[in-house]
Protein backbone atom coordinates (compact mmCIF):
# COMPACT_ATOMS: atom_id res chain seq x y z
CA UNK A 1 0.00 0.00 0.00
CA UNK A 2 1.45 3.33 -1.09
CA UNK A 3 1.95 6.07 1.46
CA UNK A 4 0.10 9.31 0.86
CA UNK A 5 2.13 12.08 -0.80
CA UNK A 6 2.68 14.47 2.10
CA UNK A 7 5.54 16.85 2.80
CA UNK A 8 6.69 14.67 5.72
CA UNK A 9 6.77 11.50 3.56
CA UNK A 10 8.65 13.27 0.75
CA UNK A 11 11.32 14.55 3.18
CA UNK A 12 11.60 11.09 4.77
CA UNK A 13 12.02 9.45 1.34
CA UNK A 14 14.62 12.04 0.29
CA UNK A 15 16.61 11.58 3.52
CA UNK A 16 16.51 7.81 3.09
CA UNK A 17 17.75 8.09 -0.52
CA UNK A 18 20.56 10.44 0.58
CA UNK A 19 21.67 8.04 3.32
CA UNK A 20 21.74 5.07 0.93
CA UNK A 21 23.63 7.04 -1.76
CA UNK A 22 26.20 8.47 0.66
CA UNK A 23 26.78 5.02 2.17
CA UNK A 24 27.37 3.56 -1.30
CA UNK A 25 29.64 6.45 -2.24
CA UNK A 26 31.66 6.02 0.96
CA UNK A 27 32.01 2.28 0.35
CA UNK A 28 33.21 2.80 -3.22
CA UNK A 29 35.70 5.43 -2.00
CA UNK A 30 37.04 3.06 0.65
CA UNK A 31 37.42 0.26 -1.88
CA UNK A 32 39.20 2.39 -4.50
CA UNK A 33 41.29 4.72 -2.32
CA UNK A 34 44.30 2.41 -2.02
CA UNK A 35 44.25 1.61 -5.75
CA UNK A 36 44.18 5.33 -6.58
CA UNK A 37 47.15 5.95 -4.27
CA UNK A 38 49.05 3.02 -5.81
CA UNK A 39 48.38 4.37 -9.30
CA UNK A 40 49.57 7.86 -8.31
CA UNK A 41 52.73 6.39 -6.75
CA UNK A 42 53.40 4.33 -9.90
CA UNK A 43 52.93 7.44 -12.09
CA UNK A 44 55.34 9.40 -9.88
CA UNK A 45 57.97 6.62 -10.04
CA UNK A 46 57.65 6.42 -13.82
CA UNK A 47 57.96 10.21 -14.11
CA UNK A 48 61.05 10.22 -11.87
CA UNK A 49 62.68 7.54 -14.05
CA UNK A 50 61.78 9.50 -17.20
CA UNK A 51 63.33 12.80 -16.09
CA UNK A 52 66.60 11.63 -14.50
CA UNK A 53 69.77 9.92 -15.70
CA UNK A 54 70.57 6.39 -14.53
CA UNK A 55 70.38 5.89 -10.75
CA UNK A 56 70.53 2.94 -8.35
CA UNK A 57 68.41 4.08 -5.41
CA UNK A 58 64.66 4.56 -5.03
CA UNK A 59 64.21 8.36 -5.06
CA UNK A 60 60.54 8.07 -4.09
CA UNK A 61 61.56 6.69 -0.67
CA UNK A 62 63.21 9.94 0.37
CA UNK A 63 60.93 12.61 -1.03
CA UNK A 64 61.13 16.04 0.57
CA UNK A 65 58.38 18.66 0.56
CA UNK A 66 60.04 21.98 -0.31
CA UNK A 67 58.05 25.14 -0.96
CA UNK A 68 55.33 24.39 -3.49
CA UNK A 69 56.79 21.11 -4.68
CA UNK A 70 58.26 17.75 -3.83
CA UNK A 71 61.88 16.88 -4.61
CA UNK A 72 63.37 13.43 -5.07
CA UNK A 73 67.14 12.81 -4.96
CA UNK A 74 68.59 10.18 -7.29
CA UNK A 75 71.99 8.69 -6.56
CA UNK A 76 74.39 6.32 -8.27
CA UNK A 77 76.91 4.64 -5.94
CA UNK A 78 75.70 7.03 -3.19
CA UNK A 79 76.61 10.12 -5.26
CA UNK A 80 73.73 12.45 -6.30
CA UNK A 81 73.21 12.31 -10.07
CA UNK A 82 70.01 14.31 -10.27
CA UNK A 83 66.94 15.73 -8.63
CA UNK A 84 63.34 15.26 -9.78
CA UNK A 85 60.97 18.03 -8.77
CA UNK A 86 57.19 17.58 -8.87
CA UNK A 87 55.14 20.80 -9.12
CA UNK A 88 51.69 21.96 -10.16
CA UNK A 89 50.97 24.94 -12.36
CA UNK A 90 47.78 26.40 -13.81
CA UNK A 91 47.20 25.86 -17.51
CA UNK A 92 44.33 26.82 -19.81
CA UNK A 93 42.11 23.92 -18.72
CA UNK A 94 43.18 23.63 -15.09
CA UNK A 95 46.09 22.25 -13.11
CA UNK A 96 49.12 20.69 -14.82
CA UNK A 97 51.12 18.33 -12.60
CA UNK A 98 54.63 17.89 -13.92
CA UNK A 99 58.04 16.48 -13.04
CA UNK A 100 61.26 18.28 -13.95
CA UNK A 101 64.62 16.55 -13.70
CA UNK A 102 67.75 18.54 -12.88
CA UNK A 103 71.37 17.50 -12.95
CA UNK A 104 73.37 18.53 -9.85
CA UNK A 105 74.58 21.71 -11.63
CA UNK A 106 70.98 22.85 -12.26
CA UNK A 107 70.80 21.87 -15.94
CA UNK A 108 67.42 20.48 -16.95
CA UNK A 109 67.79 16.82 -17.90
CA UNK A 110 64.20 16.11 -18.94
CA UNK A 111 60.54 16.86 -18.16
CA UNK A 112 57.33 14.84 -17.87
CA UNK A 113 53.68 15.84 -17.60
CA UNK A 114 51.92 13.59 -15.10
CA UNK A 115 48.36 15.00 -15.18
CA UNK A 116 46.60 17.79 -17.03
CA UNK A 117 43.19 18.97 -18.24
CA UNK A 118 44.30 20.84 -21.33
CA UNK A 119 42.30 20.93 -24.56
CA UNK A 120 42.73 17.74 -26.65
CA UNK A 121 44.62 18.44 -29.87
CA UNK A 122 45.92 21.79 -28.62
CA UNK A 123 47.24 22.21 -25.08
CA UNK A 124 47.23 18.45 -24.54
CA UNK A 125 50.22 18.33 -26.92
CA UNK A 126 52.28 19.22 -23.84
CA UNK A 127 52.27 15.51 -22.98
CA UNK A 128 54.23 14.76 -26.17
CA UNK A 129 57.94 14.55 -25.27
CA UNK A 130 58.73 16.00 -28.72
CA UNK A 131 56.70 19.22 -28.34
CA UNK A 132 58.68 22.46 -28.61
CA UNK A 133 58.78 23.60 -24.98
CA UNK A 134 59.70 20.16 -23.64
CA UNK A 135 62.50 19.61 -26.15
CA UNK A 136 63.88 23.13 -25.91
CA UNK A 137 64.23 23.30 -22.10
CA UNK A 138 66.37 20.14 -21.97
CA UNK A 139 70.03 20.96 -21.54
CA UNK A 140 69.31 24.49 -20.40
CA UNK A 141 70.05 25.94 -16.96
CA UNK A 142 67.27 28.24 -15.71
CA UNK A 143 69.86 30.37 -13.90
CA UNK A 144 71.24 31.55 -17.25
CA UNK A 145 68.37 31.00 -19.71
CA UNK A 146 65.22 33.06 -20.25
CA UNK A 147 62.63 30.30 -19.92
CA UNK A 148 59.68 32.17 -21.38
CA UNK A 149 58.00 31.77 -24.76
CA UNK A 150 59.57 33.64 -27.68
CA UNK A 151 56.31 35.55 -28.05
CA UNK A 152 57.12 37.13 -24.64
CA UNK A 153 60.77 37.78 -25.53
CA UNK A 154 62.07 34.45 -24.23
CA UNK A 155 64.14 31.67 -25.78
CA UNK A 156 61.51 28.90 -26.02
CA UNK A 157 59.06 28.33 -28.90
CA UNK A 158 55.53 27.65 -27.68
CA UNK A 159 53.06 25.09 -28.92
CA UNK A 160 51.20 26.50 -31.93
CA UNK A 161 47.76 27.82 -30.84
CA UNK A 162 48.52 26.92 -27.20
CA UNK A 163 50.48 29.85 -25.85
CA UNK A 164 48.72 29.71 -22.48
CA UNK A 165 49.66 26.05 -22.00
CA UNK A 166 53.24 26.77 -23.10
CA UNK A 167 53.50 29.66 -20.64
CA UNK A 168 52.07 27.48 -17.86
CA UNK A 169 54.53 24.69 -18.61
CA UNK A 170 57.49 27.08 -18.53
CA UNK A 171 56.20 28.67 -15.33
CA UNK A 172 56.11 25.17 -13.85
CA UNK A 173 59.72 24.58 -14.93
CA UNK A 174 60.77 27.84 -13.26
CA UNK A 175 58.82 26.89 -10.10
CA UNK A 176 60.57 23.51 -10.10
CA UNK A 177 63.92 25.28 -10.38
CA UNK A 178 63.00 27.44 -7.38
CA UNK A 179 62.34 24.25 -5.38
CA UNK A 180 65.67 22.81 -6.61
CA UNK A 181 67.51 26.00 -5.53
CA UNK A 182 65.87 26.00 -2.10
CA UNK A 183 66.75 22.34 -1.56
CA UNK A 184 70.32 22.33 -2.93
CA UNK A 185 71.44 25.93 -2.43
CA UNK A 186 72.18 26.25 -6.18
CA UNK A 187 72.40 29.57 -7.98
CA UNK A 188 68.99 31.29 -8.01
CA UNK A 189 67.39 32.67 -11.14
CA UNK A 190 68.81 35.89 -12.55
CA UNK A 191 65.57 37.88 -12.44
CA UNK A 192 66.96 40.56 -14.76
CA UNK A 193 67.12 37.94 -17.54
CA UNK A 194 63.88 36.09 -16.81
CA UNK A 195 60.54 37.72 -17.53
CA UNK A 196 57.79 36.75 -15.16
Image (spheres, rainbow, N blue to C red):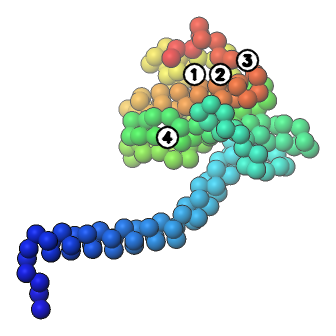
Is 174 situated above or below 55?
above
- Measuring from the top left, give residue 187's x and y in whole percent: 73, 17
Secondary structure at numbered mark 1: loop
Identify which residue is drawn at 48% across, 31% down.
168
Disc 1 vs disc 2: Cβ atoms closer than 8 Å? yes
Alpha-carbon distance for marks 2 and 4? 20 Å
Q: Earlier in the sequence, mark 3 or mark 1?
A: 1
Q: Earlier in the sequence, mark 4 or mark 3?
A: 4
Alpha-carbon distance for marks 3 and 1? 15 Å
- Circle 1 is placed at which residue position? 147
Q: Residues within 10 Å of mark 3 (few under 14, many from 20)?
A: some
Secondary structure at numbered mark 4: strand
Q: Earlier in the sequence, mark 4 or mark 1?
A: 4
Identify which residue is drawn at 18% across, 69% down.
11
**Residue farthest along the right direction in this orientation:** 77
- Measuring from the top left, give residue 99's x and y in whole percent: 62, 40
Disc 2 vs disc 4: Cβ atoms closer than 8 Å? no
Q: Nearer the viewer, mark 3 or mark 2?
A: 3
- Circle 4 is placed at which residue position? 96
- Circle 2 is placed at which residue position? 142
Q: Nearer the viewer, mark 2 or mark 4?
A: 4
Q: Earlier in the sequence, mark 3 or mark 2?
A: 2
Amino acid sequence: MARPSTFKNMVLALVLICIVCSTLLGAVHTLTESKIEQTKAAKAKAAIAAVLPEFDNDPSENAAKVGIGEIYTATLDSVPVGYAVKVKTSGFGGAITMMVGFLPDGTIYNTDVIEHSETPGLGAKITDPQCNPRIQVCGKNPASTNLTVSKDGGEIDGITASTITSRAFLKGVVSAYDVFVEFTGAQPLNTTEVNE
